[in-house]
Image: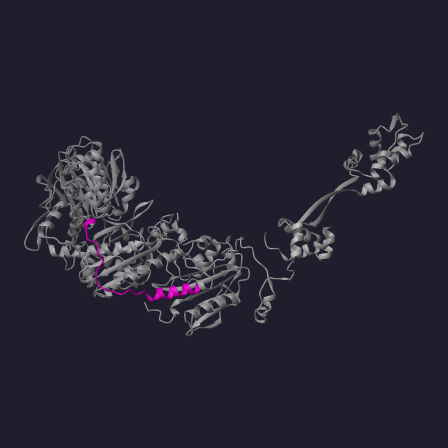
């Protein structure tokens, strides 16, 4: 049995004396409306403490038309009274009740019309109809006829009678706590100790709460945060750099030939702005043209300063890490950068013109390609991907190069990102004398897998409902 | 990326093994198998390996990798006795010419298709869309040597490939599909490049289109290859790749005399490499003998030459070998990436977050405490959102991208607040209140820095809420500020404040102007604020 409300208790207390009463009467005693009393009674009935009887009484009421007929008689009765032996049809037509009454007279066969004369038929009358009009009854077919004619209306009145059940009576006999219920606990009640006498309203725990939405970090930011933490734990220093970069740092310093397709207008966002080339750029120029002082042949051709001065929206965060290396040429360097990068791609469900890239570099005296594989294996393992494998690949500024793939249950091997050792053509002109291991990965790919997104745009044009519903903690199942 | 069609029967004949063995291993030399079909596979190779853009080239390397035939492939070249002259007037137009005679070819539909697709892939990967290199392949028995590479008046006409009537070169640039595609490469020159035979028949209008006369058919037995361009090395590579692929298919290669020099020679280049350097780079123990063996597996000529040296003969088709490390990558591939010992480096280092990201994380924490939900809008947007809808003037330091993809993405954001309002538009139908924030990069000319912004919308959102939230954020980030009445038209007059630090405006807060709400189609009042995170004490100078 659910906890009784204060009102149920009050009702039961009254019923103990009244035993059985109708709702208006109880309402008077309880100083409430009959409707409220019926509602409490139903609650008590659900708990088996009371019995509610619903009785429907039919009543007939007269319409305005009917009221007039009660006074003056039905129209047909009025006409009958009017008809004398000499009465003509024309006379009758002048009577105000003619329109309705004459039809009834004909229908009921009370008059005979011959030519212009109207005569009553002896032995029949409208007496029974008049009786029905004055004493309507459910069983009387004439009453039904009067309802049809719009003279009478039938209405229903519901009456509730409420009685206490034996269980209810027993309960009341045990004694009811009739103290008033309190909804809130006030400061005064707490301090004064009055709370001891309080009857605090109890809540139904089976009801769902009203939704509360905490302020929280974007699920994508959380994934970025997780990657940052892993790299910080692995001893990497975080880098931050501008999204606007000179072509020199975005391409040329990375030995990307000036006629490389990736540098064309259709793949890169160019800006009108230019920046002066850094000191010592000539070494990069020489590397492009003839391989500088290394065993490289360079790209040949003429390297143009103005192409290198032009600013672009960075196409990779490598533009940030290469500058860091140029400024910090002494080993060891372990650094990473997560940031927005830009590609001039048509935007659709799986391609964005801007997305997050994570990139790491390691420069040290004796680091090898094997160490690079080791770092990647460690990183992906910590992300939750247990199986990692490597494939030969090609990137213009690394040699040897590789692609890392991870195994995801139910999907298979997924390419996660590229890596390699910076070419000597990249490092030598900047005065970096040790191998640099570099690797990058598309953060959004992992986010898409983890959040089960079908459309990458959703990361950046998010539905608030999606953000509210995505829990902060999502169990990691094999990396996703 | 170049996707190459490999017909199984042809590939099996050339490789001398079954398709399964080949396809199981082809990814290990650097490729992605795109599709496995009934009679062929489509495999994608990297742009640095144009020598793999034909079944012949793939078979050559797979024979080595599978141990069927290792070491250098040699391609004998006989002089053809044919000369090619170059008009000095081409010096500033398209100066470089390469050519070769290829005899004894026997084409079927498949092998013609394969040579045509090799030609197209080379145009793309080596030729940079035909600007650096363009290749013409001709039935040599339809023309008479010697051949002449000349600079010709654009009014000269000939019948271009796939057409029936004679057209002038000007007309070809306007009407022929290839002419329209590549017109930009020649149209600004007064004279156009043209290749003719000794009877003045046109072979080719490089880099646009061949003549119909020299069309290669199933009956073609002998081929004249012309390769023109602007870069000597690229032209030579294209010639070498085509000639060696044709030689792999059984043809005989003959050289042509250009400017007194016999070309091509198809001779390997030589490099002396250090075993120690290679071992260190890859992290494996190698000897001169083991390294030479691995290189031979990748089809290099390689012999130990001293205690630490391997003498390597680099085949003429390996355009990608620019540096010793390029050879070391081949050593790693031959060794197998899966066999390399993968150990993280041993040097001890301490991780350190960047102060900008530390600040951003603290800002996020404070926002969350105030009940704000993070969103991560795009950084590319447009002037309409950033300025017009906000009733603000365009900022001086806004960057316009030169070739935007759409009118939606024309500038890099200079503030965050308008993008948050866009979010409110997007989420109009979602439950209120909505409190959203973002922390992220904005630009001022070429300088990038971070801002933080928050919006709150519900029927009672007002100036007091904006002020209280902004004050809480600024306090949490230790920004010591004062407030002045603002003139920012994005907010309601009398319900807006400028955030001042050291006499400089670093942010703004207030109740968004109803005209701005109308512009963004937002239906409830919005309390908003934005400030520059450079005001955080200790923000690094970048």
Residue B262, image x, y percentages = 9, 44
Judge by depth and name the residue closer to the eye, A244 or B184: A244
Say above or below: A171 vs B254.
below
Q: How many marks?
A: 0
Q: Which residues are magenta?
A: B338-367
Q: What's the colour scheme?
A: one colour
Residue B481 drawn above or below residue A32: below
- Residue farthest toward the bottom in the current orientation of the protein: B502
Front-lying residue, A117 or B476: B476
| Nearer to the camera, B253 or A226 | A226
Question: Can you give x and y, in whole percent of width and height, for residue A300 in the image?
Answer: 18, 54
Does residue A379 appear left or right of residue A164 in this picture?
left
Query: What is the x, y in percent for residue A155?
Result: 75, 43
Residue B445's image quarter?
Answer: bottom left
* Magenta-span inclusion, residue B253: no
Tell me: B184 left or right of B139: right
Query: Could you tell me if residue B215 is visible in this image?
Result: no
- Residue A454 image position (x, y, % from top left): 39, 47
View extreme (left): residue: B306
**Image-quadrant location for residue B200:** top left
Q: Quarter of the image holding residue A59?
A: top right
Front residue (pair B353, A166): A166
- Give the answer, above or below, for where B38 lies relative to B51: above
Q: Is residue A429 visible in the rendered structure shown here?
A: yes
Q: Is residue B349 magenta?
A: yes
């Amino acid at each position: 049995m659910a906890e009784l409300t204060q009102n149920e208790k009050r009702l039961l207390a009254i019923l103990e004396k009244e035993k059985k009463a109708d709702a208006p009467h109880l309402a008077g005693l309880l100083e409430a409306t009959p409707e409220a009393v019926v509602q409490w009674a139903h609650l008590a009935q659900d708990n088996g403490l009371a019995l509610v009887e619903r009785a429907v009484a039919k009543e007939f009421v007269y319409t305005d038309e009917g009221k007039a007929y009660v006074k003056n008689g039905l129209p047909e009765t009025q006409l009958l009274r009017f008809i004398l032996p000499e009465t003509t049809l024309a006379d009758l037509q002048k009577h105000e009740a003619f329109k309705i009454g004459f039809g009834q007279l004909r229908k009921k066969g009370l008059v005979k019309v011959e030519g212009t004369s109207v005569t009553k038929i002896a032995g029949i009358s409208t007496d029974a109809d008049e009786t029905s009009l004055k004493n309507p009854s459910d069983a009387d077919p004439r009453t039904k006829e009067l309802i049809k004619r719009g003279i009478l209306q039938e209405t229903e009145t519901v009456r509730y009678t409420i009685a206490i059940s034996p269980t209810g009576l027993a309960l009341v006999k045990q004694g009811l706590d009739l103290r008033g219920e309190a909804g809130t606990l006030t400061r005064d009640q707490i301090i004064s100790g009055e709370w001891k006498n309080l009857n605090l309203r109890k809540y139904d725990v089976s009801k769902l709460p009203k939704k509360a939405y905490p302020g929280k970090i974007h699920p994508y930011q959380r994934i970025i945060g997780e990657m940052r933490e892993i790299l910080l734990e692995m001893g990497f220093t975080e880098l931050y750099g501008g999204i606007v970069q000179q072509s020199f740092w975005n391409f040329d310093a990375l030995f990307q030939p000036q006629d490389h397709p990736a540098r064309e207008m259709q793949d890169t966002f160019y800006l009108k702005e230019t920046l002066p080339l850094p000191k010592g750029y000539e070494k990069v120029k020489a590397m492009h043209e003839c391989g500088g002082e290394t065993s490289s042949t360079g790209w040949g051709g003429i390297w143009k300063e103005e192409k290198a001065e032009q600013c672009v929206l960075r196409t990779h965060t490598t533009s940030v890490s290469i500058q860091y290396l140029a400024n910090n040429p002494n080993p060891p360097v372990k650094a990473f950068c997560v940031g927005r990068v830009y590609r001039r791609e048509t935007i659709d469900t799986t391609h964005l013109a801007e997305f997050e890239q994570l990139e790491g570099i390691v420069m040290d005296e004796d680091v090898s390609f094997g160490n690079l594989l080791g770092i990647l294996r460690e990183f992906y393992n910590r992300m939750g991907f247990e199986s990692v494998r490597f494939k030969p690949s090609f990137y213009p500024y690394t040699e040897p190069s590789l692609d890392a793939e991870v195994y995801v249950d139910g999907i298979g091997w997924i390419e996660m990102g590229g890596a390699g050792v910076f070419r000597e053509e990249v490092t030598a002109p900047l005065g970096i004398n040790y191998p640099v291991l570099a690797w990058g990965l598309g953060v959004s790919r992992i986010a898409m897998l983890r959040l089960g997104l079908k459309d990458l745009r959703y990361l950046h044009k998010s539905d608030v409902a999606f953000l509210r519903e995505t829990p902060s903690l999502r169990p990691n199942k094999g990396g996703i | 990326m170049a996707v190459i069609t490999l017909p199984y029967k042809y590939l099996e004949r050339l490789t001398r093994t079954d398709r399964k063995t080949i396809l199981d291993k082809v990814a290990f030399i650097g490729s992605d198998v795109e599709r496995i079909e009934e009679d062929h596979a489509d495999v994608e190779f990297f742009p640095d390996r144009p020598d793999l853009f034909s079944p012949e080239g793939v078979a050559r390397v797979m024979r080595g990798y599978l141990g069927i035939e290792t070491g250098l492939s040699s391609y004998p070249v006989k002089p053809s006795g044919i000369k090619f002259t170059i008009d000095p007037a081409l010096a500033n137009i398209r100066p470089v010419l390469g050519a070769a005679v290829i005899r004894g070819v026997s084409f079927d539909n498949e092998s013609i298709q394969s040579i045509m697709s090799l030609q197209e892939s080379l145009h793309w990967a080596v030729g940079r869309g035909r600007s650096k290199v363009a290749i013409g392949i001709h039935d040599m028995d339809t023309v008479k040597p010697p051949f002449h590479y000349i600079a010709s008046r654009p009014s000269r006409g000939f019948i271009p490939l796939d057409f029936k009537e004679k057209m002038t070169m000007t007309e070809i640039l306007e009407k022929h599909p290839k002419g329209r595609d590549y017109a930009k490469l020649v149209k600004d020159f007064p004279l156009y490049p043209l290749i003719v035979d000794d009877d003045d028949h046109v072979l080719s209008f490089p880099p646009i289109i061949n003549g119909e006369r020299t069309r290669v058919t199933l009956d073609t037995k002998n081929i004249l290859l012309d390769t023109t361009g602007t870069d000597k090395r690229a032209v030579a590579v294209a010639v070498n790749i085509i000639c060696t692929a044709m030689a792999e298919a059984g043809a005989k290669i003959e050289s042509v005399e250009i400017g007194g020099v016999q070309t091509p020679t198809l001779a390997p280049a030589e490099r002396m490499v250090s075993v120690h350097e290679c071992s260190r780079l890859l992290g494996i123990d190698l000897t001169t003998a083991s390294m030479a063996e691995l290189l031979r597996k990748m089809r290099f000529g390689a012999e130990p030459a001293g205690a630490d040296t391997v003498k390597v003969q680099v085949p003429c088709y390996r355009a990608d070998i620019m540096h010793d490390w390029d050879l070391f990558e081949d050593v790693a591939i031959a060794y197998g990436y899966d066999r390399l010992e993968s150990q993280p480096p041993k040097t001890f280092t301490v991780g350190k977050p960047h102060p900008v990201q530390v600040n951003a994380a603290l800002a996020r924490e404070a926002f969350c405490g105030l009940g704000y939900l993070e969103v991560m809008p795009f950084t590319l947007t447009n002037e309409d959102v950033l300025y017009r809808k906000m009733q603000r003037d365009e900022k001086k330091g806004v960057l316009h991208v030169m070739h935007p993809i759409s009118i939606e993405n024309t500038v890099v954001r200079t503030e965050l607040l308008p993008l948050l309002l866009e979010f409110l538009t997007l989420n109009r139908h979602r439950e209120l209140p909505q409190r959203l924030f973002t922390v992220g990069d904005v630009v001022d000319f070429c300088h990038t820095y971070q801002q933080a912004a928050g919006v709150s919308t519900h029927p009672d959102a007002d100036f007091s809420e904006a002020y209280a939230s902004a004050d809480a954020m600024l306090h949490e980030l230790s920004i010591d500020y004062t407030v002045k009445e603002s003139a920012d038209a994005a907010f309601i007059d009398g319900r807006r404040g400028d955030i001042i630090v050291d006499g400089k405006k670093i942010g703004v807060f207030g109740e968004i102007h109803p005209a701005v709400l109308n512009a963004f189609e937002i239906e409830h009042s919005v309390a908003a604020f934005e400030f520059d995170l450079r005001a955080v004490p200790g923000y690094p100078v970048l």
